[in-house]
Amino acid sequence: MQDSLWQAVLGEIELTVSRASFITWFKNTQMVRYKEGLLTVGVPNVFIKQQLESKYSQLVLDTLEKNGIKPDKVEYKIHAVQPPRRPVDEPVLVPSPGGATVNTAPRSARSNLTHSYRQGINERYTFDNFVVGSGNELAYAACQAIAQNPGSKYNPLFIYGGVGIGKTHLIQAVGNAILANNPATIIVYASTEQFVQEFVDSLRFKRTTDFAKHYRSADVLIVDDMQFIAGKEKVQEEFFHTFNALHQANRQIIISSDKPPREIPTLEERLRSRFTWGMSIDMQNPDFETRCAIIQTKASTQNIVLEPSVVEFLSNLVQTNIRELEGALNQLLAWCEMRGLEPTMEIASSLLGSSKTRPKHISAKQIIERTAKHFQIPMEDILGPKRDKDIVVPRQIAMYILRSELHLSFPKIARELGRKDHTTAIHSVEKIEKEAGFDADIRTAIAEIKDRLYA
Ligand code: ADP
Ligand code: MG
């Protein structure tokens, strides 16, 4: 009863907030109790608790009311935390001679492998520990669909995007999920560099048949970092044949790359066209909320709950590369662990810089002036009522920097820019955050303005 009510509330909230926000803040909540006017919502961690309290409490109340419930009070309680997982940085390669990926035992008749053609899928890359947010949700959904039904849809799946945003994690998660469903599946995972190296070796040692057989034995072939095939004609030809053989047999092919097929230089036309037969998905940089959720998830696998200010500090520190984000977090946690200290904001900022090297006395006015100067528009315009795009965007960027550098509240940001309504500030900051994910010009502008500010 309670649960279906809460599901109805969630259903409605899902329609009002962005998908990333929904997944990050609401998805794993539940209604624990509703008694004597007090409604208790269970949430996975303190970070989510604070966000819900500070940002979404009105929305929750309104939505409850629409569903016929008017509690005197809603409280958020930390509830049923996920069991701890393996520490994040412990690599788990499937042990076997040469590092075999593939669970070939039951079907070894079909593949006549020599061990040098195999390589490991890392067990730690799962769907469970992948945080879904704007930027990766489409890729995630496609990978899930494939894991449930390999070879039938989206074949090939071609995922592309920048460094450290989770491509390898996601495509290996498909392999792990398929193996969990059906351990007899032959998953062949290779980086393109490895494919190239093995191909060259097979020519040299006259084992081309073994090489071909190995790759063609795959039920699921996962090839990572396809951009490295650029300029390698022979390899491209070999891959073309492998691709055709597998595709005709309805075997699943998954490819990742740092750029879309059309931008991989010297990629043979016939390969290029095959890569676009199925589905191509652009993975984008994680937004602020997703970065926060990732940090929180990674910390909780080590049973650590970070203060929200530390989480926000880290996600502002590293904005695109999740590998670096993880690195910064691990550095902080390791430093604190060795000294038996709690990871506080002071430690984070003195250890990881930014505020360490940057003086604190930057004022809101300086930020706005600097931004106006950068875009060569007069101060009166940025503070005034004009709504031309050339002025609106710099204004939004100024708001974003006020938020990320000075952590001003939205009403304060709005006032600084002569706005009455603080929702404009919220909207602007979110918009710039999102756009900085895929728009290099915006990223560069922000970086340049900040550099000048602190110079
Ligand atoms: P890429 O292959 O795109 O360069 P990786 O898949 O190697 O990036 O990801 C870099 C690191 O970031 C990995 O440790 C991965 O587990 C982690 N990571 C990336 N995206 C996510 C995510 N959405 N949730 C959790 N961890 C992530
Ligand atoms: Mg990778």
Image (cartoon, helix red, strand yellow):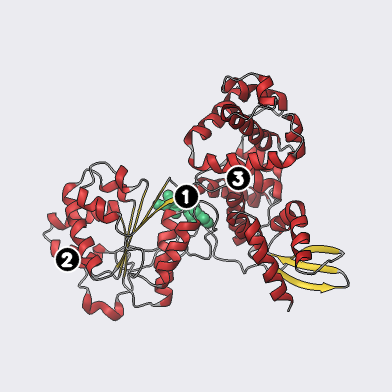
Image spot of residue 202 (x, y percent):
16, 58
Q: Are marks 2 and 1 in contact (CB under 8 Å)?
A: no
Asked whether residue 448 appears in the rendered view, the answer is: yes
**CA–CA distance between discs 3 and 1?**
14 Å
Ligand 1 within 8 Å, label 1 CB: yes
Asked whether residue 363 appears in the rendered view, the answer is: no
Q: Hey, what amino acid is under mark 2?
A: Asp
Residue pictured at 66% horizontal, 34% vertical? 399
Q: Disc number at residue 210? A: 2
Camera-near label (2 vs 1) is: 1
Q: Hey, what amino acid is under mark 1?
A: Ile
Residue pictured at 76% horizontal, 32% vertical? 415
Camera-near label (3 vs 2) is: 3
Q: Which residue is mark 3?
A: 315
Is residue 118 left or right of 347 when viewed as pictured? left
Q: Where's the N terminus, which quadrant?
A: bottom right
In primary-sequence order, the first of circles 3 and 2 is: 2
SS at mark 2 in the image: helix
Q: Disc number at residue 165? A: 1
SS at mark 3 in the image: helix
SS at mark 1 in the image: loop
Q: Residues within 10 Å of mark 1 (few under 14, many from 20)?
A: many
Image spot of residue 302 (x, y percent):
61, 60
